[in-house]
Image (cartoon, rainbow, N blue to C red):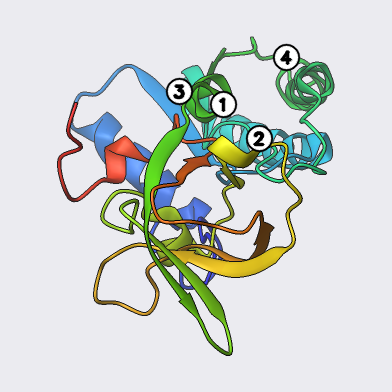
Amino acid sequence: MGLTTSGIGAKFRELPDQALEGYKIAMENGCKRFGIQIMVGSIVAEPEHFFGVASDISEIAVKFQKTLGIVFEYVDIRGGFGIPYRINEKKLDIKKVAENVYKAFKSNFIDARYKIPELVIEPGRYIVANSGVLPGTVLDIKKQELNYVGTDAGMNILLRPALYGAYHHLIIANKVNQEANFMADVTGQICENTDRIASGIYIPEPEIGDTVAIFNAGAYVESMVSEKISQ
């Protein structure tokens, strides 16, 4: 499992020649204002990646402008910026990202004597992910070949781990100062074996009634929920 946003087999993919034909048809039908967009990926935290993406889309945009005589008003770098979901992951260097994007745009638009279009970005996850913590209550504990801690925070509320294999840091909130020496999978109550919020993590010895706290829940949690969360 994992995120797929481009390449062969991705439903989002459109080849440059196909896009060029689309712009041509739009012009023939009277369209006069144009923008162009590219998907960079959802949780990328490497500044160098954004240089490659900005280089690709600006090169394509310049080619389209030369071929069709159109002017792009904006370039939309979709997908946003990655955040560190794990404790030891590094933060994305936003300043370096900006430098790389400008460098790529300059080398294509300005060197081709075109005005740099407006840059549009989608930094939602970068802004709000850390603003939310999802609480849950321990309802069941099963000790066997693998230990399971059942909570009321299942995949119906937090879908990302089951859907993408995504990681969300999880703690027992009322035992933050206790030793984390109990290894378990933390699950929800849905009748699906993939309903695991965390796998193979170490937490303090759990008890029914404990409160779990699941971090980085401010983005792509409530928007993907399949059951209304009680206020």
Residue depicted at x 20% and y 37%: 229
Indicate the amino acid at tag 2. Answer: Ile
Label 2 CA crowd tier, 10 Å (few <14, some 14–19, many 20+): many
* Cα–Cα gap, marks 3 and 4: 14 Å
Mark 2, secondary structure of its residue: loop
Comes first in the chain, label 1 or label 2? 2
Give the percent coordinates (x, y) of residue 227.
16, 48
Comes first in the chain, label 3 or label 2? 3
Residue position marked by numbered label 2 in the rendering: 83
Q: Nearer the viewer, mark 1 or mark 2?
A: 1
Residue position marked by numbered label 1 in the rendering: 130
Q: Quadrant of residue 42?
A: top right
Indicate the amino acid at tag 1. Answer: Asn
* Cα–Cα gap, marks 1 and 3: 41 Å
Mark 4, secondary structure of its residue: loop
Label 1 CA crowd tier, 10 Å (few <14, some 14–19, many 20+): some
Indicate the amino acid at tag 4. Answer: Arg
Q: Nearer the viewer, mark 3 or mark 2?
A: 2
Give the percent coordinates (x, y) of residue 134.
42, 36
